[in-house]
Amino acid sequence: MSDDTKKVSWPASGGRVREGAGKTTAITDFFTIGQVADLLEVSTRTVRRWISTGLLVTHQIGGVVRIAEHDLRVFLAHHRAG
């Protein structure tokens, strides 16, 4: 990794697992637009532009916009500099 590459610090939970009735379901961590902007050190306007152009997938949960950790990782993998 070069000196000018930014490291993204992910939440420690790494996704929670809920068990019940014989089934195991992975619960995904979700981020707000502001959290994504802070993690990537860009403006919220930039994140909203990525969303409006379809580059970053979002989910509507309870009337608010959230970005799943998996979708953010996919976005970063496809837009890696270098």
Image (cartoon, grey):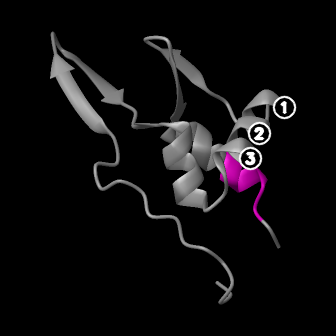
Residue at 71% of width from left, 43% of height from top? Answer: 45
Outermost residue on the bottom side: it is 3
Q: Which mark is residue 53?
A: 1
Give the alpha-carbon distance from disc 3 to disc 2, as whole Å. 6 Å
Looking at the rendering, the stretch of residues picked out in magenta corresponds to 75-80
What kind of residue is marked 3?
Answer: Thr
Give the alpha-carbon distance from disc 1 to disc 3, as whole Å. 11 Å
Residue at 51% of width from left, 34% of height from top? Answer: 68
Is mark 1 in CB contact (under 8 Å) with mark 3?
A: no
Q: Which residue is mark 2?
A: 50
72 up-or-down from 17: above or below: below
52 up-or-down from 61: above or below: below
Q: Viewed as shown, does residue 58 lie left or right of 52?
A: left
Q: Residues within 10 Å of mark 2 (few under 14, many from 20)?
A: some
Q: Viewed as shown, does residue 63 lie left or right of 76?
A: left
Is mark 2 in CB contact (under 8 Å) with mark 1?
A: yes
* Helix, strand or loop for disc 3: helix
Q: Residues within 10 Å of mark 1 (few under 14, many from 20)?
A: few
70 up-or-down from 3: above or below: above
Q: Which mark is residue 46?
A: 3
Residue at 53% of width from left, 56% of height from top? Answer: 38
What kind of residue is marked 2?
Answer: Trp
How far across and how far down the image is residue 35, in percent?
49, 47
* Helix, strand or loop for disc 2: helix
